[in-house]
Amino acid sequence: MNSKLMKPIFLFSALISYISVHAVEYKSYSTVLKNGMKVIVCEKPDVHFTEFEVWYKTGSKDEVPGIRGMAHMFEHMMFRGTKKFPGNSIFDNVDKYGGSCNAYTDYDRTVYHEYVPEDALETVFDMESDRMANLVISQEILDTERQVVGEEFRNGVNNWYQKLDLERSKLLYPTGHPYEVSVIGYLEEITQFTSKQCQDFYDKYYSPNNAYLVIVGNVKSQAMFDLAEKYFGKVTKQLDLKVRTDVPDIISNKLKAPELNLDYPIPVQVFSYILPQPSAGSTEYYAFHMFKNLLFVGENSILQSRLVKKDHQAYAIQLASEDESMYSNYCIMDIIMQAFPGNARVKKVIREEIDRIATDGVSQDLMNQFITSTEATEMMNSYSPETIAQQLGIAEYYLHDYNKAYSEVDELKKITVADLKNVATKYFSTERIQVLNVKPM
């Protein structure tokens, strides 16, 4: 589950500082079918395989008590076939062309993707459109997939960091917030799902006007539009789409507890720094994420250099949240340390650095190095159809315009030292930041 404003490898070398690099922007086109489904095509002529992605605008945000974990469960159900493509036909058809297929579920979205040669594309169009309209759902299929999902859940809680994420989510959000439950859900509810509940979820959230298509490869846009019309155009199902307006406020929300005691086998302590973040595309969005990377999570960020590399007060600083979300959300950064009584001094160091930037700012050179590093990362990512498709999909969903997929560097170049000082004061103040102390039992 990755969706994100790019987190560049933060390189501070003379080489990366002085080389001017630019991401290759391949031509992208779009159309909207009569049933409301948008089709985005990026013509990338230098590849032999095509990335094909169907983005459904549904995820765990759409669950209610009693079906926590349904969105992820349904991701599995979608691979169990239709009457036309029964059983494992999706995997078998992709495999015979030497391709691959998979999917992921997040709070806001569920994405199904195939990576196939051009001669397999019409088959993929046929399969994806068919399972959008004609998925076979039965109690037998549900019982089989429930075992798989249950095993994923148990494997997750056996990983200490995934267990931390699962348990922390219970403390973060006010009741009724779309993200108050981890995407994996609750095992006790997963074991009670019925085939009718699955059918209801499918009927409510899987339709052409609640999805869009992203295709990246050595293809022609008009040919892809024609195939989309041929296969997805005949799917007539429509949903009455509504965006929630009753989402509880998180700015004034307080953690349900200041500490979390976890039973895990390694002697580590984590300070989770938790603060509301600006919405994607807002005026402070890019300045916030530049500040976050410069201070906390960049490879050679100020705190990585001081706490991890120089003073050895922490093992690592890890970003534990996504940069984009449909609804108000938190930025979470984990300071991972050896469990030790003197760790409170780490908080003091972090507060000193935040206050210093709020007062003095950061150097323009440091900002320029971050921008150059981001440009280098964009250039490397521009060779991958999968990464391009991800960027286009994220921009379409959260910035409401796939053309903004390539705008990050331009937006970063507009940021001033004063902007970062403002972000430090507004978002990283003692009133906004909450620290959850995660300790071993």
Image (spheres, grey):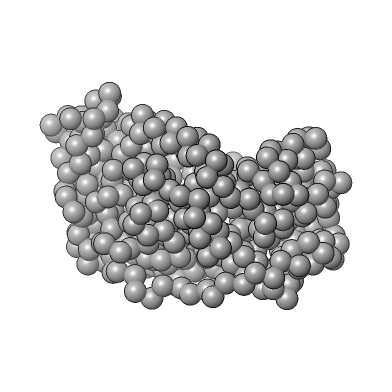
- Most extreme residue toward the top is 265
On the image, the x and y values in percent for residue 440 come to 21, 31
Pick the residue in front: 159 or 2: 159
Q: Relative to 178, is 54 on the left or the right?
A: right
Dividing the picture into quadrants, the one containing residue 331 is: bottom left
Q: Could you tell me if residue 47 is visible in this image?
A: no
Q: Could you tell me if residue 163 is visible in this image?
A: yes
Q: Relative to 399, is 159 on the left or the right?
A: left
Pick the residue in front: 66 or 24: 66
Q: Relative to 79, is 275 on the left or the right?
A: left
Dividing the picture into quadrants, the one containing residue 134 is: bottom right
Residue at figure coordinates x 53%, y 65% from the top left: 204
Above/below status of 263 relative to 145: above
Above/below status of 4 relative to 239: above
Residue at figure coordinates x 37%, y 60% from the top left: 64
Pick the residue in front: 438 or 65: 65
Dividing the picture into quadrants, the one containing residue 427 is: bottom left
On the image, the x and y values in percent for residue 392 come to 64, 59
On the image, the x and y values in percent for residue 353 come to 27, 50
Residue at figure coordinates x 45%, y 49% from the top left: 194
On the image, the x and y values in percent for residue 161 come to 35, 35
The total number of labels drawn is: 0
Above/below status of 299 relative to 374: above
Residue at figure coordinates x 53%, y 57% from the top left: 199
